Image (spheres, rainbow, N blue to C red):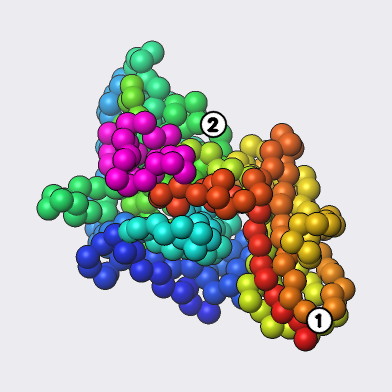
Amino acid sequence: MPLSEKHDETKTYDDILNAGPPLNQLAKEFITPTELFFVRNHASIPAVDLSNYRLVVNGLVSRELSLTLDEIKSGFEPQTLIATLQCAGNRRKELVDYKPIDDQLAWGIEAIGTATWTGLRLGDMLKAAGIASDRAAHIGFLGLDGIMRDGERSSYGSSIPLDKALACEVLLAYQMNGQDLPLAHGSPLRVIVPGYIGARSVKWLCGISVLEDPSDNYFQQVGYKLFPPSINMYNVNYADGMQLTKLPVNSVIVQPEDRSLMAAGKIAVEGYAMSDGEHEITWVSVSADGGETWQRAEFLNEPQLWTWQLWRTEFDLPSGTHELVVRAWDTAANSQPETIASTWNFKGYVNNAWHRVRITLK
């Protein structure tokens, strides 16, 4: 089944692919089929000529590198990792329904997916270049996609702290689910930063820079920053914003869908939970009465770092309207806030309030 297209209201042209799986196909399997893995873009997918492709590594390095894809594949030990990626805007629609959010993509719960990624460790690439200064503190990334903003063309960019970049889980991936990386997912090379918002896993990677400060790219300094509920697009000072990195604990009901009409009796409730990747999900509680009483869900896979946790439970419910609610905890005892009001922000990022689904049984 194809992805369901989402439209990016921040752009004035309509050739930008943003898509997620139909909800009846979301989280059906631990590994998301490539054709059902969500796509988030800020510009048109670039045309990449592999014969001219080079990855450039520069900045505070001992030696600058300029490598072809073949040199990357042959010159570094391949690594494989299963990791979940999640868009910072996942579950934004609930925030929009609570209070309007302008010029942002109104994702539901589908901007998430888990894949098997193969490539090389970013740390190995940085070792090959050599970090030349004790002032080095961030690693910047630059993609090949061209973005028009205020009449000027620029590329998508981002950065992560050096200590995260050197962690063994951060990859430069050229394969996804055992096949060459598809163009829509960043071919020929993309960054995979498990546990961080998806925006830091830059696609169509062409540049890596060792930096003293975070990247000055728009999407690092403005695009993906978090603000408290009191800040809006009219009083914002982007210098005060928090640069988004780690994902918060989150859990979501996938089935049944909101506003479902079903037969009374035994109701199966299924979903996913996710933490920052460094901590496993240890407990998922589900309520069928709006949060008054709870029962523990069973896990459908063994908990592991850097991935989502699929879960399931059942209720025996009479006819009428019922509010299903889910919340989760991880091994650091992190959990979720109860209300949408406490997570609302004018960009609509990292909503991890208790997820609620209303169903009617007859």
Write the start and end of the magenta stretch as one range.
216-242
Residue 181 x/y as whole percent: 43, 58
Q: Secondary structure at mark 1?
A: loop
Q: Closest to the observer: 191 or 297?
A: 297
Q: Is residue 288 visible?
A: yes
Does the image show residue 183?
A: no
Q: Which mark is residue 5?
A: none
Q: Nearer the viewer, mark 1 or mark 2?
A: 1
Q: Residue at x 39, y 65 (%)?
A: 18
* Residue type of the residue flagged with mark 1: Ser
For disc 1, the neighbor class at 10 Å (few under 14, some 14 to 19, many from 20) is few
Residue matched to label 1 = 319
Asked if the magenta segment contains residue 241, the reply would be yes
The residue nearer to you, when weighing 22 against 263, is: 263
Answer with left or right where residue 357 lies relative to residue 266: left
Q: Considering only vertical position in the picture, is 55 above or below 250?
A: above
The picture places residue 29, in percent across and down from the top left corner, at: 66, 66
Quarter of the C terminus within the rendering:
bottom right
Check disc 2: other Cα within 10 Å, few if <14, some if 14-19, many if 20+. few
Task: Give the residue at x 56% y 34%.
Answer: 168
Q: Residue at x 40, y 69 (%)?
A: 6
Query: In terms of sequence position, does the residue under pointer 1 or pointer 2 come before the other?
Result: 2
The residue indicated by pointer 2 is 167
307 vs 128, nearest the viewer = 307
Under mark 2, the amino acid is Ala
In the rendered structure, does residue 69 fall within the stretch colored magenta?
no
Q: Is residue 308 left or right of residue 188?
A: right
Considering the numbered disc 2 on the image, is that residue within a helix, a strand or a loop? loop
- Relative image position of residue 39 (x, y in whole percent): 43, 62
Q: Nearer the viewer, residue 183 or 54?
A: 183
